[in-house]
Image: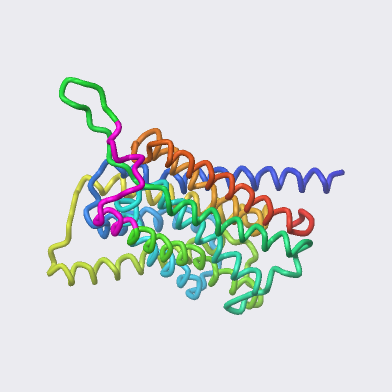
Amino acid sequence: KLRLSFRTMSALGGHLYAAVSVLFFGSNFAVVAKYDAGDGMLFQLVLCLGIWFTGLCVMVPRNPAFYPIAMIGGVIWCSGNCLTVYIIRQIGLGPGLVTWGTTALIIGWVTGFFGLFGLQSDQPCLEKPWLNVVGLGFAFLALASSTLIRKTEPLKPPPGGEPEDMPTSDSFAERPAAAKGRAKGILASLIAGTCYGLNFLPSTWIQQHVKGASQDGLDYAFNQFCGILAASMLYFLIYCAWKGNKPQVNPEIMLPGFVSGVMWAIAQSCWFVANVQLGYSAAFPIILIGPGLIGSLWSVFLFKDIRGQRNYLLLLIYFVLAAISCGCIVASRKGTGT
């Protein structure tokens, strides 16, 4: 009974950490949405400073071993993060979170199921492999539906009147420039999602191949965050050189950007803990799919860049497909112990 109670409490704590992670991943860009991020390069640098500072606060009391290889995961993540401002401008916060989150889920599934990049395959841990494959299929369907969600223009009140919906918000026909921009935004989301799906690989490889390495994923957070900051600084310097030492700078983005980075780092740290207490098969689907819901709620109720029955229907279809996908993937695993 004591062992069962411990597992129950561990699972409850894991779900709590996953919930916090989902909330912060889905909200960290909302704190900077009303500020002009320019082309996003200064923003991503300030964001990464907030991430590194939070990682330092996590590392100091734990004093874990430092593995430079784990920094590669941070470099991979930062490469995708540089695209986020562009993605949000092209397709909106909610659709962006939905698309890159679903892509990351697919990448993570393929890596774990087949044991790519030298990692151990998850197939011995699967009680029903066919159900796991079905879950992947629903993830693909969710991704397909998310690409049809269209960002709409903010509501503009007519002179002396109340705001009205733009007449094109529900139209299936788009201007060529808008359609082209949306296609580029979706492509950028796919690239970013690929980076996000691979960012845990170096840490997991160390855990599985380095003798005596800690099995607590949280001990690798600062390693990864150092890689994030290093890559961010390198990309920013390259960008400054490309712009002739005249980068786009908006001082107002500094504090919100730093806060956004702290929120992201809290979410990522909670993800490390959830991985331990729930296992990757449960934590990954929940944390990758969940932020799309939070981000879409911000887009619908605060930013008003998702409106119209067509978009609402597509969002509903996405969340139904995503929920089925997560349920299949989690149910295909053996047992509950970690």
Q: Is residue 13 above or below residue 249?
A: above
Q: Quadrant of residue 212?
A: bottom right
The number of callouts visible is: 0
Q: The N terminus lies in which quarter of the figure?
A: top right
Would residue 331 appear left or right of 63 to someone viewing this image?
right
- In this picture, is 154 found above or below 130? above
Q: Is residue 170 magenta?
A: yes
The residue at the point 39 percent across, 36 percent down is 308
Q: Nearer the viewer, residue 223 or 270?
A: 270
Quarter of the image containing the C terminus? bottom right
Protein image colouring: rainbow
Q: Relative to 203, say whether 323 is above or below.
A: above
Chain part drawn in magenta: 165-182
Q: Main secondary structure of the magenta part?
A: loop
Where is residue 66 shown, x and y percent of the image? 51, 70
Residue sitting at 48 percent across and 74 percent down?
68
Residue 297 locus on image (x, y percent): 44, 38
Residue at image point 53% right, 72% down:
202
In this orientation, which residue lies closer to the viewer: 148 or 323?
A: 148
Q: Residue at x 42, y 42 (%)?
A: 311
Q: Is residue 181 left or right of residue 27?
A: left
Residue situated furthest right in the rendering: 1
Residue 120: x and y in percent read 67, 74
Query: How far from the left and from the top, in percent, is residue 84?
Result: 35, 56
Magenta stretch: residue 189 in it?
no
